[in-house]
């Protein structure tokens, strides 16, 4: 996996170390364990997927974490992305709108000892106002437009990584909040399931 990640542009040593040590197979069904470390997405039920390792690593690297950040994740899904983030940030807050996934990942985090992950069941497109501002926000589903409500929950200097575009393909953006407003960088094409919610897709 590490060779694939390095060829894909992952140069952050901390990200590579965490990607190597995080047991991705435990975040998918046992039937998929033989495929767990290939660089491709896998189904996790409820019409959702676990992102390919390179995508997880690229989004994580783009946050430029130093270990002291409070990070919000929109779309817990399998829990794999949050597990990776939890080893590189001070605390991770993650929101999942699909109850079976929320319940499954909450138990998995406890079983695996990821105790600095705080979970919530609800509409992630609204963010988590009571815990804002965040040093980083990562959105693990494709938004139809830039979710301004989430950007406004960034701290000054904070960064949000978010896929924006159509239902079938998007562009990955890094949004940085500055004292003057926001800057954005296009990190390239990507493909995610739709971000469903009040400030995303209707369905």
Image: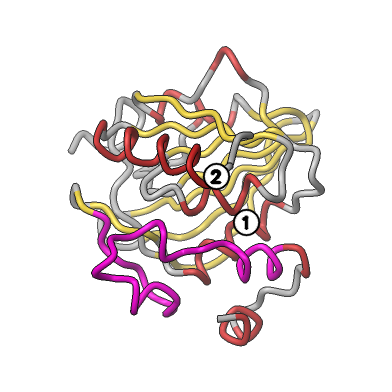
Residue 169 in percent (x, y) is at: 33, 63
Up-down relation of residue 119 to residue 31 (above or below):
above
Badge 2 is on which residue?
A: 138
Rendered image quadrant of residue 75: top left
Say which label, 2 or 1, has the lower sequence index. 1
Residue 79 in percent (x, y) is at: 44, 47
For label 1, the SS is helix
Q: Quadrant of the N terminus?
A: bottom right
Furthest-top residue in this view: 130
Mark 1 surroundings: few (<14), some (14-19) or many (≥20) residues within 10 A:
many
The span from disc 2 to disc 1 (Cα, nearest Å) is 8 Å
Instruction: Please report the residue visible at 69 percent of the width from the left and 70 percent of the height from the top.
Output: 16
Rendered image quadrant of residue 198: top left
Q: Quadrant of the C terminus?
A: top left
State the mark number for residue 199.
Answer: none
Residue 202 in percent (x, y) is at: 21, 34
Instruction: Please report the residue visible at 63 percent of the width from the left and 56 percent of the height from the top.
Output: 185
Magenta span covers which residues?
A: 15-44
Rendered image quadrant of residue 151: top right
Left or right of 193? Residue 188 is right
Magenta stretch holds residue 16:
yes
Left or right of 141? Residue 98 is left
Residue 128 in percent (x, y) is at: 51, 21
Magenta stretch holds residue 128:
no
Instruction: Please report the residue visible at 69 percent of the width from the left and 33 percent of the height from the top.
Output: 70
Viewer-side residue, 136 vs 165: 136
Furthest-front residue in this view: 111
Badge 1 is on which residue?
A: 60
User: Mark 2 and 1 residues: CB-CB less than 8 Å, in contact?
Assistant: yes
For label 2, the SS is strand
Instruction: Please report the residue visible at 61 percent of the width from the left and 18 percent of the height from the top.
Output: 131
């Amino acid at each position: 996996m590490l060779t694939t990640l390095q060829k894909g542009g992952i140069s952050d040593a901390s990200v590579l170390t965490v990607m190597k040590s995080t047991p991705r197979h435990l975040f998918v069904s046992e039937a998929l364990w033989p495929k767990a470390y290939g660089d491709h997405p896998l189904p996790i039920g409820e019409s959702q997927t676990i992102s390919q390792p390179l995508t997880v690593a690229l989004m994580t690297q783009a946050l430029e974490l130093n270990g002291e950040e409070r990070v919000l994740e929109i779309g817990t899904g399998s829990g794999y992305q949050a597990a990776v983030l939890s080893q590189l940030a001070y605390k991770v807050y993650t929101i999942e709108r699909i109850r079976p996934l929320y319940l499954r990942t909450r138990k998995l985090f406890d079983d695996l000892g990821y105790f600095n992950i705080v979970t919530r069941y609800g509409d992630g497109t609204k963010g988590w106002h009571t815990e804002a501002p965040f040093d980083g926000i990562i959105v693990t589903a494709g938004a139809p437009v830039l979710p301004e409500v989430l950007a406004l929950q960034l701290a000054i200097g904070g960064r949000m990584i978010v896929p924006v575009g159509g239902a079938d393909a998007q562009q990955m953006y890094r949004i940085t909040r500055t004292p003057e407003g926001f800057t954005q960088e296009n990190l390239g094409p990507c493909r995610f399931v739709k971000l469903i919610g009040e400030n995303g897709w209707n369905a």
